[in-house]
Every structure is written in structure tokens, then in C-alpha cells.
Image (cartoon, rainbow, N blue to C red):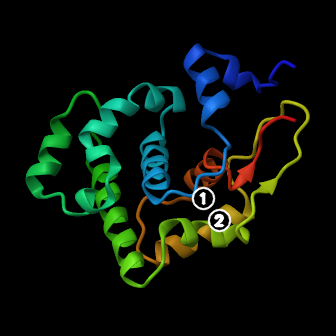
């Protein structure tokens, strides 16, 4: 049986690989969730392909998205990242990733994982869109607007409803894969 892919996933071999092996599969590991959350944040205003092609550079630049290490980044690290031509050198985005790692550490201190924090928004179950044909997904939903609002209240940065909905589909909180 041939795997059904949406049009965007057939655009390049990289996007095919992303769809076939990563996109939309439920993720429950804090570090993997943080990595995808950070990459989604960097995508704002850019294409996903631009970010996905640079993911290894992002992994190297951000200590493999080790939450504790990123949370402890210093001004020296921020300057290094702002000069790193292999990643997106947006200071606001870099600062947001560091801030978000610090917020996750606060969650841990309260006995919550980032996994439990995120997945509770969907009652710990992927929300299945039941897609059988290639349709363009909405850029945001009422749920992603509410989640973004709560995340900002909880201290997360750069968490608009579009970024959150893209993240939710990427990590399988919303199942938008074709059946």
C-alpha cells in the first residue's frame, strides 16, 4: 500500500522523509517536544523546509535541545547564537527558546513534565481530524488560541496560536495525517 501524503509533503525528499517519519506521530519525550517546540518557534515567518534543513545545526547550536543546558545559556551563548550563520539568527527567537527551557524547568520543579503540560490540553489523546483527502489545514484553531493564551500566562514566549497549532500537528497532538 502506498503512503498517502499531502501535497506539501511531496514537495522535496526532505519533506517526504519528515512526513513519513516525524510529522504527526505522537511525541511524549520532554526533550523531543522541546526540540520541536523550539524549531516551530524558529519557523515563524519562514518555511518549515528552511528550518528542517537546518535542524542538525540547531541541534548543535542548542546542545541537542537539552532543556537544562539551554536554560542555563549565558549572554556569551546568546552572542554566539546570534553570530551562528548555520541557524536563524533572530535574537528574540533565541531568547524565547532559552526562556521556554527555563519555564520547563519550573514545571519540573512543580512535579510536571513538559509532556504532561502540553498533552493535558488535548486530554492526553490525539485529536483525530480524520482526513482522507489533502486539505489545507487552518493556520490556527480556537483550541490553539486558548493554549497559546495559557502558555503566555505560564511564562512561555513566542507562542502565538499559529505556532502552537503547527506544533500540535507536528507532535501528534492533532492527527492531521492522511488516512
Tag 2, which secondary structure? helix
Please rate how many residues cluster around mark 1, counting C-alpha atoms within 10 Å: few if below 14, some from 14 to 19, many from 20.
many
**Residue 154, percent from left and from top:** 46, 78
Q: CA distance from mark 2 to mark 1?
A: 5 Å
Q: Are marks 2 and 1 in contact (CB under 8 Å)?
A: yes
Vertical relation: 148 (above or below) 76: below
Mark linked to residue 161: 1
The N terminus - image quarter:
top right
Vertical relation: 1 (above or below) 162: above
Tag 1, which secondary structure? helix
Quarter of the view holding residue 134: top right
**Label tally:** 2
Mark linked to residue 145: 2
Extreme-bottom residue of the structure: 110
Left or right: where 118 falls relative to 91: right
For the question of whether residue 88 can be seen, the reply is no
**Residue 110, percent from left and from top:** 41, 85
Extreme-left residue of the structure: 76
- Residue drawn at 22 percent across, 28 percent down: 85
**Residue 95, percent from left and from top:** 28, 56
The C terminus - image quarter:
top right
- Residue drawn at 73 percent across, 53 percent down: 174
Quarter of the view holding residue 80: top left
- Residue drawn at 47 percent across, 40 percent down: 43
- Residue drawn at 41 percent across, 64 percent down: 157
Left or right: where 99 falls relative to 52: left
Please rate how many residues cluster around mark 2, counting C-alpha atoms within 10 Å: few if below 14, some from 14 to 19, many from 20.
some
- Label whose residue precedes the other's in the sequence (2 or 1): 2
For the question of whether residue 139 can be seen, the reply is yes
Mark linked to residue 30: none
**Residue 146, percent from left and from top:** 65, 71
Amino acid at each position: 500500500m502506498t503512503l498517502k501524503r499531502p501535497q506539501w509533503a511531496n514537495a522535496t525528499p526532505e519533506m517526504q522523509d519528515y512526513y513519513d517519519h516525524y510529522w504527526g506521530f505522537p511525541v511524549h519525550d520532554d526533550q523531543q517536544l522541546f526540540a520541536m517546540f523550539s524549531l516551530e518557534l524558529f519557523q515563524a515567518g519562514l518555511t518549515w523546509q528552511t528550518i528542517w534543513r537546518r535542524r542538525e545545526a540547531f541541534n548543535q547550536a542548542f546542545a541537542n535541545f537539552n532543556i537544562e543546558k539551554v536554560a542555563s545559556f549565558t549572554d556569551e551563548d546568546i552572542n554566539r547564537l546570534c553570530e551562528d550563520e548555520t541557524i536563524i539568527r533572530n535574537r528574540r527567537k533565541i531568547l524565547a527558546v532559552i526562556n521556554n527551557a527555563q519555564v520547563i524547568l519550573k514545571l519540573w520543579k512543580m512535579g510536571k513534565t513538559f509532556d504532561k503540560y502540553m498533552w493535558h490540553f488535548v486530554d492526553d489523546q490525539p485529536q483525530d481530524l480524520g482526513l482522507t483527502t489533502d486539505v489545507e489545514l487552518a493556520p490556527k484553531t480556537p483550541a490553539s488560541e486558548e493554549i497559546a493564551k495559557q502558555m503566555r500566562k505560564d511564562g512561555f514566549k513566542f507562542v502565538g496560536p499559529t505556532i502552537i497549532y503547527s506544533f500540535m500537528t507536528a507532535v501528534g497532538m492533532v492527527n492531521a495525517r492522511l488516512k
